[in-house]
Each structure stands twice: as C-alpha cells, then as structure tokens.
Amino acid sequence: MISFRLNNPTEILFGAGQIAGLATLVPAGARVLLLYGGGSIKANGVHDQVTKALSHVEVVEFGGIESNPVYETIMKAAALVRETGCNWVLGVGGGSVVDAAKFLAYVAPLDVTDPWEHLARGGAVTTILPVGAVLTLPATGSESNPVSVISNKGRHLKLPFAQDGARPRFAVLDPTTMASLSRRQLENGAVDAFTHVIEQYLTLPVNAPVQFGFSETILRVLIEWGPVLVEKNTPEARENVMWAANQALNGLIGSGVPQDWSTHMIGHALTALYDIDHARTLSMVMPSLLRHKAADKLPMLVRYARNVWGIEEEDEAVAAEKAIAATADFFARMGCPIRTSDMAEVDIEAVVSHIAEAGQLPLGEDKDIDADAIRAILREAA
Ligand code: NZQ
Ligand code: ZN
C-alpha cells in the first residue's frame, strides 16, 4: 500500500428532514453567504427549508451559479462576500454549486492581482472561510472532498483546484431533495460516481484489499440501483445512489492506491470546448481509454471482470475486454453516450492543447498517457 494521510472532517447528516439540522450546524453570529444555482432550490422547496433552519443567523444570498461553475460569476460572489462581511459560505445545490462554494471560501479573502493565475500556479491561500453544503444532486462527492472544478470563460479552461481547508465542515444529504431531478441529471449522477470509483480502482494491483473490496461494493450498488433510480426514482434508489456517490469520492477508496483520472482530465477539456455535461464526457471517453490501457491495467481489469461483473471467462485478455464492454453497456443503459461523435465533432488537437495548457500532461497512473496517446484514445472514441 502507498503511505497516506487521511483526514475527512466533514460531518454528514444523511436522511429525510436533515436540512433542519442547519439550525445547530451553523453557529450563532455567523453571517452566511447562501450560494445557489439556477433556481431549482426555489422550485422544490429546499430554499424554504434552508432559510427556515437559518433563522438564527444573518443570510446574504447569491444565485446564478452555472452548471460547470464559471470563475467570472464566482468573482462576483466574492465581491459580495467582501462587501457584506460574510464569514461563512453555504452551498445549496449540486456539485457545481458546492464546488463554487469551496472555491469562493478562499478566493474571496485572497488579495492578489490575478487570483486565477495565482491559484492555477499553486499559490498559497490566506484565509479559508468555513463552508457547509446542502446537496441536492448526488454525483461528484464534492460535499465532502477538497476539490473544486472551475471553468474560466475568458481563458477557455476548466481546471481542478484543491484545498484541504475548503472541505465542507458539514454536508446535509437528504435524498428526498432528489425527487425533482430530471432523468438526465439522475443518469449523469450515477455515471459520474461510477467513473470516480473506476479512476481509483482500475489502476495497478497494489496491496489494498480494503480499498478495492469497497470500490467493488460501490460499483455493484451503482450497477444495481442506478437503473432503478433513473427509471423509477424510488426512495431506496435515491438513498443508495446518494450514499454511494458520496463514498466514491470522499478520499477513502483512493487512499493508499495509485489513481488514474485521465478520463476526467480529457472530459474536462471536452466540457470546456463543447459544453457537454460532465458525466457524458466521461462515458464517451472511458471505454476507449480502458481499451487503450488494457495491457497495463490487465490484473485490475480481470479482478473487476470477476468481482463486479461476474465474468468467469478464463482467458484474461478476453475477460478484460468483456468487462470493458459491460462498462460501456452500463453507460448506454444509463442513457449516456459512449462515442464522442454522439455529442460533437471533436477537434482532437484542441483537446490536447487544453490538457497541455492545464499542465496535466502526461496523464494516467503510470504517467504514460502523453499527447499521442490522447490522440489515439480520442480517435478510438469517435
Ligand atoms: O442550477 P440549479 O438550479 O441548481 O440546477 C441544477 C443544474 O441545472 C440541477 N439540479 C441540482 N439539484 C437539483 C436540480 N434540479 C432539480 N432538482 C434538484 N434536486 O441539475 C443541474 C446540474 O447540476 P450540477 O451541480 O452542475 O451537476 P453535478 O452535481 O453533476 O456537478 C457537475 C460539476 O461538478 C464537477 C464537474 O466537473 C462539473 O463542473 N466535478 C466536481 C468534482 C469534485 N468536486 O470532486 C469531481 C467531479 O469529477 C466533477 O469534475
Ligand atoms: Zn466526475
């Protein structure tokens, strides 16, 4: 196992009615910047529940955070934080709002000429305001991890940022808030969570039976309950997918194991260039990427074939290919594209340039997915 340090301090409140717990989670005297998206929380009653539970503190609201949250919009929220003296940030929504809330918590107090440039180069933050999250769309795991993926419209870049201190102090996961989600967002959520596990599990066979076994459980839960969620949106499916998505990217299964994330970095470029939903960029790249790396990933692909898909085929290469085909079939059954040509005519050089400009080359657990490998993967995915 690779040595690791794990500290996930996010307090989780899971279940129906837990939004009322904000009354005790946010301390008296806090001045809260309530951050939200395009208005779904006003239509489905979540906004009412949140403001009722926050009646003991002062609340300033900022709405309009986009899907794939935009830096320029977050900087407007940052100006409001400074103007009003807010000392807490509460993100209420999906991964985009929660990502924006975490980024806002350290960009608002930051006094540098060009905060994007500063942070993209790994510059230090000064203060991080305390963050809380009320999650309404299970997918990203953002509610208890340190990552924010932010799109800079001016620079045409979508980049991940991470600050441990920005992990939410608490996250409220009430599955009943998922009742108003569209089929497309339910599809996206389960598929995104699935790929998060794959990026941390289908790498190299280190000694990590706890992490790999738990990863397999999360994958099997998503394979069983993802389709039920999409077709019927039952209370049981909501609970199971919401918890699985959280566990998929809260740091636990990725501790002590090599991680890949190349599908995600290629996917971020595709979203930046073609405005495609995050999960859909992943479903259309991952099968080709796994095929391209099948020889290196063989031991884990075989384990995945046997333990997740129940494939008994003895020939290891054939078993690996069957597992990749089953993965693509799962994405397709979840309503997501498995070829880039289903969504856009992709300019492969533009994708490579995005990843190069983001400073992410080479990708992969072996750091061997270079520009040429990305070209080959995208040709195969077309
Ligand atoms: O804008 P609102 O009105 O909130 O509507 C949203 C949005 O239109 C809607 N929605 C959310 N909850 C709803 C609802 N509609 C009805 N009822 C509800 N209960 O759903 C739409 C999509 O929301 P969004 O937050 O954009 O989706 P998601 O949670 O999939 O987040 C995607 C973003 O997270 C980033 C992605 O790159 C993308 O920018 N990621 C963040 C990660 C992290 N922090 O660790 C990891 C991921 O791999 C990912 O990159
Ligand atoms: Zn993702």
Image (cartoon, rainbow, N blue to C red):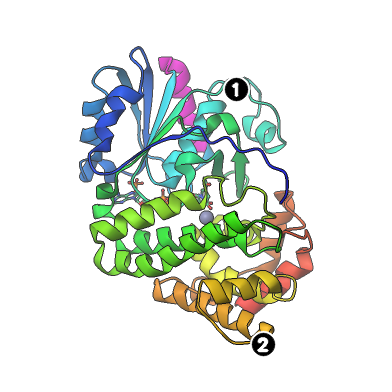
Q: Could you tell me which residue is drawn at 44 percent across and 53 percent down? A: 245
357 with respect to 22 (left or right): right
Q: Residue at x 37, y 39 (%)?
A: 64
Vertical order, 237 against 300 (above or below): above
Q: Is residue 18 left or right of residue 353?
A: left
- The residue beneath circle 2 is 315
Q: 312 or 81: which is nearer to us?
A: 312
**Does mark 2's beta carbon lie closer than 8 Å to ligand 2?**
no
Residue 41 location (% of width, % of height): 27, 42
Q: Is 31 contained in the magenta span?
A: no
Q: Vertically, is 328 above or below 76?
A: below
Q: Nearer the viewer, mark 2 or mark 1?
A: 2
Residue found at x 76% / y 55%:
361
At label 2, which amino acid type do we have? Asp
- Residue hosting label 1: 110
Instruction: Specify the segment rendered in magenta.
Output: 72-86
Main secondary structure of the magenta stretch: helix
